[in-house]
Image (cartoon, rainbow, N blue to C red):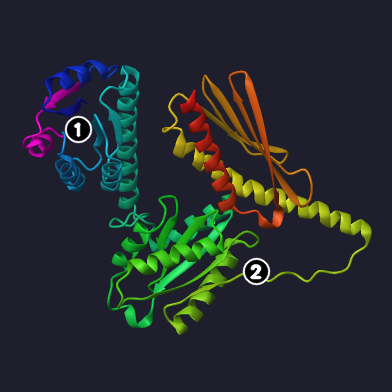
Amino acid sequence: MQNIVVLITDNEKVAQKINKKVLLLRNTDILQTIHHADCFDKVRKIKPVLIFYHLKLNREDDFLNFLQKARQNKDLKTCSIILIYDDLDENLLCSAFEKGITDFIRTTASDTEYTIRTLWCLQKRDNVEDNKNKKDLLSQLKILDRKNQVFTENYTYTVLKEESKKDWGCFAVVAPDINSRNKISPDTLMSIIKDNVRACDILGYASDFKIYLWFRNTSNEDTRKILTKIKRALTSDFTISAGYTETKEIPFDEAEVLANKALSKALLKGNSFICVQEKPKPQKQKTTKIDIQNFKQHKANSVKKLENILSPLFFQMQKTNEDKLFETKITQKVSEQKSFFTLKNQDCESSFIVTYPGFTTINIEILQKIQDKESRKKYYIDTNELSEEKLEEMLEDFIQDFNNLTAAI
C-alpha cells in the first residue's frame, strides 16, 4: 500500500530542505508539496498518512482551523500532523495539542531528528489504525458498544473481574438519579464519562441504567475527584450518584456488592457519592514475639504499598518523558530492596533511588554524575506521609533538574 506524505509550505527553500531531511522512507512512500492556499481541500483529496505543516508568520489561526477540520474529517482523523516552525508561541502549541497535533519540530532541526520523528509518526498512525480495526472487530462481536467503544452489558462484569485480578484499584458504579433518567440517554451519559476519565480506565454498561468503572491503582480519594469532574461536565438539570470502593483487600465480587449497596443509598439521597471502606479488624494484645512478627508484616505491607506507587509512577514518567528527552536513555526498576529511575546521556547521569531500610522511614537518594563531578542528596519520608502525589512531585523535580543540568553543559 502506497503511503503519501504531504508538506504544506509556500517557501520553496523549506520544501527543498524537508525533501532532503525526511529520509529512510519506504520505496512506496511519496512526499508531495502543496501551498497553503486551499490546502485542506487538497489534503482531503490526497488522503495522506502524514502531514508536515510549515507555520507562516502571523498565520497561526489558519493552522488551528486546518487542524480542527482535519480532526473532524473521517479520512484524516488518524493522519499524523507535524508542525514545522521557525519561532514557536507556546500558547499556540498548547492550543494545537488540544486540537490533536501529533508532533512539532523546528525548521532547522537535524536530518536525524526529522527522520526519527517521521518514522515515529508513521508507526503511531499504524498502531492507531490497528487499534481501530481491533475495536471494530470487537464491536461486530458485540463485546464493545459500537457507539462509545466501551464494554457491553454482557461482558462488563467478566472483563472487570479479570482486570481486578491483575492489580489493585477502585471500582465505581454510576447511575443517573431517578428524576434525571428521562433527561439524558445512557449513551450520552457514557460519552460524557468517557471524555472525563483516562484512556486506561475501563468502562462498561450494566443493568438498570448503571455504568461500571474500573480505575487501576487509584485510591478512593482520587476516585471521588474523578467523579466530581464528571459531575461538573454535566448540565445543571441532570444529576448522578455513585457508590465506589477500593479492591486492595477484597475480591471483585465483594467489591461489586458493596459498591452497588452504596449506590442504592446514594440514589436515595440523590446527587451524592458514597464510598465504602473496609472496616479495620480489631487488634489484640500480643506477646513480644508476635509483636516482632507484626513489625515484619507492617514492613512487608509498607514495601508493597511503595511498590504499588512506584511501579505505575516510574512507568508513566518514562513513557511521558522518553520522547521529550532526546538522546537520553531512561531506565527504571522497582523491587523490594531498591528501586531506581535513571536518566543518562553522554554528559550527565542522574539516578533517583528509593530504599526502605527500616519500619518507619523511606529513603530517597538523588545521585548526579556530571562528567568528572558527582553529587548526592538524601531525603527521608515518614511512611505515614507516603503518597503518590509526594513521590510524583519529587520525581518531576528530579527530571527538571536533569534538564537544567544538561542545558547548562
SS type, badge 2: loop
Amino acid residing under circle 2 = Glu
Residue 154 to residue 264: above or below: above
- Quadrant in the picture for residue 64: top left
- Look at discs 1 and 2 and give the one toward the viewer: 1
What residue does disc 2 label?
278
Few, some or many residues within 10 Å of mark 1 (<14, 14–19, 20+): many
Task: Pick whichever of labels 1 and 2 is earlier in the sequence.
Answer: 1
User: What segment carries the magenta color?
Assistant: 30-53
Residue 97 to residue 7: above or below: below
Counting from the top left corner in percent of width and height, residue 220 is at 55, 64
Q: Residue at x 55, y 57 (%)?
A: 169
> Quadrant location of the N terminus?
top left
Q: Residue at x 53, y 35 (%)?
A: 401
Q: Which mark is residue 286?
A: none
Question: Does the magenta run of residues contain 384?
Answer: no
Question: Does the magenta run of residues contain 31?
Answer: yes
Q: Residue at x 37, y 54 (%)?
A: 143
- Quadrant in the picture for residue 349: top right
SS type, badge 1: strand
- Report the front residue among 390 and 373: 373
Few, some or many residues within 10 Å of mark 2 (<14, 14–19, 20+): some
Amino acid residing under circle 1 = Tyr
Counting from the top left corner in percent of width and height, residue 118 is at 30, 26
- Report the front residue among 313 and 343: 343
What residue does disc 1 label?
53
